Amino acid sequence: MIQFKYSVVVFLSLTVLSCSTVDSTEFKGKTYEYTSWFDGDNSAELEPYRMILSEKLEEIDGDKVESLEPEAYLNYLSMLDASGKKAGVEAKIKQFIAKNPEEKRGLFLLGVHYMRTKRKELANYFFSSLEKDPKFPWKSLLFNNLGMLSLQEKDREKAIGYFEKAVKAEPAIAAPRVNLGALYIQSKSYSDALPLFEKALEIDRNFEDAVLGLGLCYEAQGKFDEAHKVYSDFYERENKALTVLYNDAVILGRRLGKKSEASELMLRYIQRGGKESSKAHEMMQGWR
């Protein structure tokens, strides 16, 4: 079974922009959806989503972008940064901060940009300063990112503390629940992890890492039919979810004895370019 990875993604929607126009009402409340989207070890898996996001950005009328209200422009910057277009992003964020010094979310976006570009000290500086601000509106995102920085520093207990704070803070987002659940899985505390993944999916039904975590909790408890349903329901509506497809094939072939069906899924996984194709071939040979 592919090992469950820590989730570092908050990516709730790709349909924020309408074709060739920018309406500020479409952006309101959407910005935070992109601000914790980091590569980690799964950069290649994020590329298809980045390409779609880049295409959406290309549809925007550049003249209208400059005239957006602060709320909408903040969202535009978060999307631009999440798309991987690093050139000029830092300067644009700094310009926004200079024009809107009272808008602390601009400082948060700058910290996110530094975290994405591997400048952890600068990211930690901005996040730590915002942590002291009781009025900062995105506490859950802030605590989640501080938790991720703590994980990068190999301080597990500190990371757990931040993720626990993030779960209790607003706005309600999926990432810290998935991250905390992943740490519980690491310590085999599956009964504690399971409700975190369930809540994450309630918040964002399209969050693949939440599906992987929930499925693994069911597997660890011997609930293989439940794991299969979680996996199959997800990849039927998200055909890019190759890890889910792989995990479901393993469940079907090894646990539920449905080797023919498992082989069909593995073949689909291979045809779509799954990175574990060699292992998939080996399992298919054993199921014949």
Image (spheres, rainbow, N blue to C red):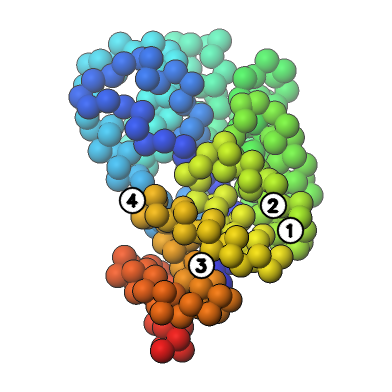
Cα distance between the residues tagged 1 and 3: 18 Å
Residue 160 can be seen in this image: yes
- Between 194 and 4, the residue placed more toward the observer is 194
Q: Which residue is mark 4?
A: 48
Q: Which mark is residue 133?
A: none
Cα distance between the residues tagged 1 and 2: 6 Å
Height in image: 62 above or below 150?
Answer: above
| Quarter the N terminus occupies | bottom right
Q: Which mark is residue 190?
A: 1
Cα distance between the residues tagged 3 and 4: 20 Å
Asked which secondary structure carries label 3, the reply is: helix
For badge 1, the amino acid type reads Tyr
Q: Which residue is mark 2?
A: 194
Q: Residue at x 56, y 27 (%)?
A: 108
Height in image: 269 above or below 97?
Answer: below
Height in image: 67 above or below 247?
Answer: above
